[in-house]
């Protein structure tokens, strides 16, 4: 049983040290297909940012509420206009980032697997689920 537990915990991987917004951009995705980002130039990794209208701070607070309601998400770092989260599945941990762009009225996003090569589309589908929840939460004011 101990070996099995160690195997499961080993799938979490180390928290990456290269995350965080720099010059208004999130970290680039690696070449592997287990990452999506609204800053990516290539279609394989590109995902749309979260668009909003109105007050940027209210939109970012709404995103934080959505993330806090999710059972698979833990906020690891919070700065003004930036959130870093861990997104968990049964065995794996992915790293997510959200960066507010007040001028563009969007929240940029990135999600990447810590381990492995392919994520079978999990990072993209999870962020699209968060998008759906973000849009739905707009009416909860």
Image (spheres, grey):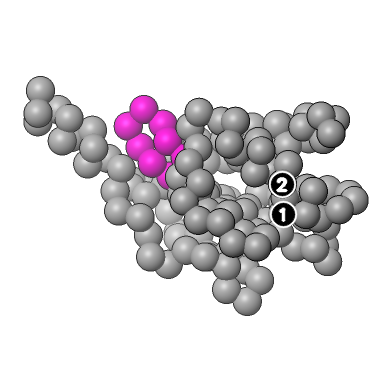
Query: Is residue 42 visible from the viewing direction of this image?
Result: no
The residue beneath circle 1 is 107
Answer with left or right where residue 124 lies relative to residue 57. Answer: left
Q: Describe the element under mark 2 as helix, strand or loop.
A: helix
Q: Do the CB atoms of the residues marked 1 and 2 lie less than 8 Å apart?
A: no
Q: Residue furthest top?
A: 1
**69 above or below 74?**
above
**Is residue 138 shown above or below 116?**
above
Task: State yes or no: residue 93 in magenta.
Answer: yes
- Identify the image quadrant of residue 133: top right
**Residue 78 belongs to magenta span:** no
User: Which label sits in the foreground, 1 or 2?
Assistant: 2
Q: For this rendering, which residue is in front, 31 or 74?
A: 74
Give above or below for 114 relative to 81: above
Q: Secondary structure at mark 1?
A: strand
In this picture, residue 140 sits left or right of residue 88? right
Mark 2 Cα-neighbour bin, 10 Å: few <14, some 14–19, many ≥20: few
Residue 141: give x, y in percent of width and height.
84, 34
State which quarter of the image contains the N terminus.
top left
The region drawn magenta spans: 87-94
Relative depth, front residue between 31 and 98 = 98
Residue pointed to by mark 2: 61
Direction bottom: furthest residue:
23
Q: Quadrant of residue 16?
A: bottom left
Real-space Cα separation, disc 1 to disc 2, in angstroms:
11 Å
Residue drawn at point x = 45 percent, y = 59 percent? 31
Mark linked to residue 18: none
Would residue 104 be visible to someone looking at this image?
Answer: yes
């Amino acid at each position: 049983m101990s070996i099995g537990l160690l195997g499961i915990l080993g799938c979490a991987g180390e928290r990456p040290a290269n995350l965080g917004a720099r010059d208004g951009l999130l970290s680039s995705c690696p070449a592997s297909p287990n990452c999506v980002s609204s800053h990516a130039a290539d279609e394989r990794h590109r995902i749309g940012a979260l668009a909003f209208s109105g007050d940027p701070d209210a939109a970012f607070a709404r995103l934080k509420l959505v993330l806090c309601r999710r059972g698979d998400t833990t906020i690891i770092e919070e700065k003004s206009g930036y959130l870093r989260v861990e997104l968990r599945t049964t065995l794996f941990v992915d790293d997510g980032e959200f960066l507010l762009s007040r001028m563009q009225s969007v929240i940029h996003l990135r999600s990447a697997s810590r381990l492995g090569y392919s994520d079978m589309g999990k990072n993209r589908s999870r962020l699209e689920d968060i998008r759906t929840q973000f849009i739905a939460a707009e009416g909860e004011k």
